[in-house]
Image (cartoon, grey):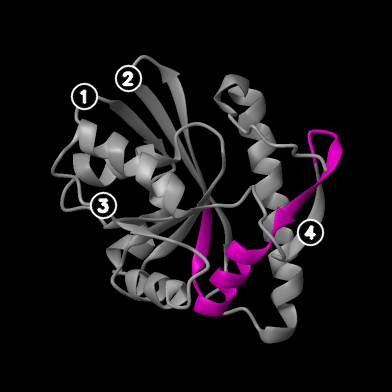
Amino acid sequence: MSKLQIHVHQLEAIDTAVAAGQGVLLLGAHLGSFEVLRGVGQRHPPGPRVVMVMYEQNAQRLNAMLSAINPMAEQNIIPPGRMDSMIRVQEELENGALVGLLGDRSFGKEKVQSITFLGKPALWPSGPFRMAVILRRPIFFMVGLHTGPGKYEIFLEQLADFTEVERDEREAVVHRAMEKYVSLLEKYCHMAPYNWFNFFDFWQ
């Protein structure tokens, strides 16, 4: 990723947590390049460790791409849905890692909420937000937009800080964070519509 030009907006949003050695959750979408986040840590060593939570099929594709770009790149990927997935995420966060996952696709019997997106209701998984609640971590929106040959812009915005949320406030805070996530996704889809590569019947 050394040949890529990457500009990060609002990096200060996570600086405080990173400086304190606290990991944060970064919630992306099928918009732009989620994987370009890795380039930030590689370009600015010794930056925080970057870990992706994704399914094995997608992980294999990502590994092949990263290996072609940088054979020395460390492959830090946690498959979701396993017995030890939450434990591994918690361990990475406790070690100060940035843990990234996608928040615009629900699978199986995962809990969802209906929130309007681009004018029509769509179902959104609440799992990533509930994970942040359980682990008492801040969660940020992250998108890496392709703006030209070899050029990317990464945008970071805080969705919620679950470090001190009371139990009876969780559902309301989760819902507000989900609404903010969808609103931001709309914003960046309008900004860069050709970066949205969601080949999925989104408005079911």
Q: Which of disc 3 and disc 4 is earlier in sequence?
A: 3
In the image, is 129 to the left or to the right of 121? left
Specify the segment rendered in magenta: 117-140
Asked whether, in this view, residue 111 is left or right of residue 101, the answer is right
Alpha-carbon span between mark 3 and mark 2: 22 Å
Between 106 and 115, the one lying in front of the other is: 106
**Alpha-carbon span between mark 2 and mark 4:** 36 Å
- Residue 70, percent across and down? 18, 36
Name the residue carrying label 1: 3
Q: Residue at horizontal 73%, vertical 60%?
A: 176
State which quadrant residue 20 falls in: bottom left
Is residue 19 part of the magenta span, yes or no?
Answer: no
Q: Residues within 10 Å of mark 2 (few under 14, many from 20)?
A: few
Above or below, comparing residue 138 to residue 191 in the picture: below
CA gap between label 3 and label 1 equals: 19 Å
Disc number for residue 75: 3
Q: Nearer the viewer, mark 3 or mark 1?
A: 3
Pointer 3 or 2: first along the chain? 3
* Image disc number at residue 149: none
Label 2, label 1: how many angstroms apart (C-alpha)?
7 Å
Please tell me whether mark 1 sits on a helix, a strand or a loop. Answer: loop
Mark 2 — residue?
A: 150
Mark 4 = which residue?
Answer: 113
183 w.r.t. 152: above or below = below
Q: Quadrant of the C terminus?
A: top right
Decide: few, some or many residues near mark 4? Use Cα within 10 Å; few <14, some 14-19, many ≥20. some
Nearest to N terminus: mark 3 or mark 1: 1
Which amino acid type corresponds to the residue marked 3 in the rendered image? Answer: Gln
Q: Is residue 133 visible?
A: yes
Evaluate whether residue 37 shows in this view: no
- Which residue is most to the bottom? 167
